[in-house]
Every structure is written in structure tokens, then in C-alpha cells.
Image (spheres, helix red, strand yellow):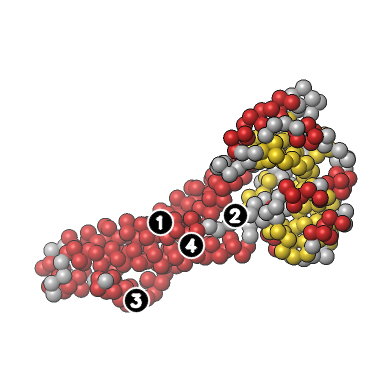
Amino acid sequence: MKLLTLALKNLTRNRLRSLLTVLGVAAGMFLYASVQTMQHSLSVATEGNANDTTLVVYRENRFCPMTSRLPEHYLATIERIKGVREVIPIQIAVNNCGASLDVITFRGVPPETLKQYNPNIKVISGSYDDFVKQSDAALVGQHFAERRGLTPGDKFEAVGVNVTVAGIISSDSPQDENVAYVHLPFLQQASRIGLGIVTQFNVRVDSADLLEPVARQIDETFKSDQQPTDTKPEKAFFAETAKQMIELIGFTRWLGLGAVVAVLGLVANAVLLIVRGRVKETAIFQTLGFSRMAIGLMVVFEGVLLGLVGGLIGVLGAMAFFHFKAFTLGNEGLTLALSPSTTVLVSGLVVAVALGLLASLYPAWKATSRPLVQSLNS
């Protein structure tokens, strides 16, 4: 603790240099944490687990929602398949099928069955009953409403669809936070698709073990139909459909690596300058009885403190940025919410401390390798 206190005092003696180093580390760790947030959000959206029981039935060889058209009467056939618990038909209208930061997605669903199918939806403002009663009403996700500045009673238009906001909803599913739910018949007519045609069916099965068997049976059932289907688990469907988004986020790994290298070089350079600036002081410490190990540890502590403080500022700044801005990436009618997480926070701090430790090893060796007499005579 005495060495740690002494290291802190050494850093505060050179306030400007320490402050600039901390800010540089914070900038690098902000970029690193931002990249990790995108990577973590993508893994949550695409990696399956034992709790996943949802299938997406799509038109075979179709990707953009505007090209996927399935007869609504498939609903009754899918409901009779063994292992199927619930089915909901969905019509999707989207302003942009490519990868985009500002995507507007309407989901047309039967209003009377939405809450039954998705009980996680909570109306935090407005009324669900108003949504059911009014044909042009919409339930808007919380993040969507924040981006557009919408409140219950407001009207807005997008993709040629005019709706009235009946309520603002919140949900455990990031998809629900970034879309506007409207009446299925209303969206079918407003988007000129026509009644009786939907984009997809979301199917909930009894257990995760039944995902593959039920998917095969659904596709076999409609294999010879005029509109054959391609059925996948929801997260696998997201991973295959949002390829542009995934490639874009995959590229950011290089940005994260660059941020790590920059932080490593910055801390190493700062600690090395500190060591070179107090050669005689280090020799006096040795004369007073400080061992080479103690002096080396003091230098290491300085590097770790610079990494920890800078990392804390950068990572917390990134978490606050994504929390308040509520960014989303959209592709093919799917949305990926870039949400901060404690996993990214902890990993960012660990990386910052590890980089500070690694960057200070060489300066620590330099501080203790010089002969005492030579240091005193410098």
C-alpha cells in the first residue's frame, strides 16, 4: 500500500502529463468498449441457447421483407403440426432493406393475439385497449419513440403508412424496443400488399429440442405449394439474413485491436518518460534502502493506475453513450439494439488494467537495471 501511495503521489506531481495520458487512454478504451458493445449485442442476437423456442417461417429464397409473401391461410396448417404451441402471422414494412443506422420497421400483427403471443410486452405509456380499438393505432417501442420524439396521441408517417401512437412499449426483446406494431389488415392495405398475404410466421414450439424437427416438418408441408417456405430458429434466421450488418460489425474488431495497441503504446511511452525524468530520484530511493523489486513495483503501479483511471473514464463513457443514445442497426427488416452490458464494463476495465501492467514492465526494468553509481552521477 505504501508503494501504491507513493506511485499515486508521483503521478500527481506531473499533473499535466498524467492528465493527458489518462485522457488518451480514455479515448482508446472508449473506442474499445464501443466495439465490444457491438460485438456483445450481436452475439446475444445470433447465438442460440436452451431458452430459445421460436421459429421464423419465411418465403424460400427471399430476403428483404418486401419480397417474402406467404398466404395467411398457412396459419391453420402450421398450428396443427405436433410440437407447435403458438403461431402469429406478421406483415413487415421497412424503409430500407440494406444495413442502416436509422431503420423504421412496422410489424402488422393481429391486435387481439399480440399480448397473448408476447406477454413480455409492457405498455409504459398510453393504452393497449386504445391500440386494439383503433385500426390505425400503433404500439411503438421505447427506443423507437425516443429516437423519433413520439408520445401517445402523436401521428407519424413513414414508408407510406400513417399511424397514431396509442402506446409506448417496453420488452425484454431488443426487437420489440425498435419497431412499431400495427394492425395486420391495416398494414396489408396501407403497404398495398393485399389482404391475406403476410411476410412471415413466428412459431413458438414446446421446447428447444423441437426447433429442428418442427422446422423440417413445416418446410416439408409446403414444399410443393406455390409459396414454399424456409424455416429457421429465430437467432439463426437473424444471423443469415443480416449478413451486411454482421460483416460491418465484424470489421470493427480491427478498430478494437487498434485501440488496444494505441493504449499500450501511450501508457508505455508515458511511464518511460516518467522513469527517465527521475533517474537520480530512483538512485536516492535505492540509497535509502528501497530494493530494486520495490522500485520496479512502484513503476508498475504507476502504469496500472494510468490504465485503470483512463479505462474507467473511457468504458463508463461508452456505456453512458450507448444507454442515452439508444443506437440501433437495421438490416432486412431486423434491428440490432446496441445496448451496454456489465460484461463489457468488466472486460473493459480488466483490459485497461492489463494494458497498464504490460506497458509498464519495460520501463520498470529500465528503472532498476542501471547501476546505482551511474544513476547518482547522471
Distance (Cα) linking label 4 and label 2:
15 Å
Residue wearing tag 4: 315
Distance (Cα) linking label 3 and label 1:
23 Å
Horizontal placement of 60 versus 188: left or right? left
Residue wearing tag 2: 338
As helix, strand or loop, the secondary structure at mark 1 comes to helix
Q: Earlier in the sequence, mark 2 or mark 1?
A: 2
Horizontal placement of 46 versus 167: left or right? left
Q: Quadrant of the N terminus?
A: bottom left
Distance (Cα) linking label 3 and label 2:
37 Å
Name the residue: 56% across, 65% down: 320
Q: Hey, what amino acid is under mark 1? A: Val
Horizontal placement of 239 versus 132: left or right? left
Point out the frontmost of discs 3 and 4: 4
Label 4 with label 1: CB-CB less than 8 Å? no
Q: Earlier in the sequence, mark 3 or mark 1?
A: 3
Name the residue: 31% across, 67% down: 302
Label 2 with label 1: CB-CB less than 8 Å? no
Q: Hey, what amino acid is under mark 2? A: Leu
Q: Hey, what amino acid is under mark 4? A: Val
As helix, strand or loop, the secondary structure at mark 3 comes to helix
As helix, strand or loop, the secondary structure at mark 4 comes to helix
Q: Earlier in the sequence, mark 3 or mark 2?
A: 3
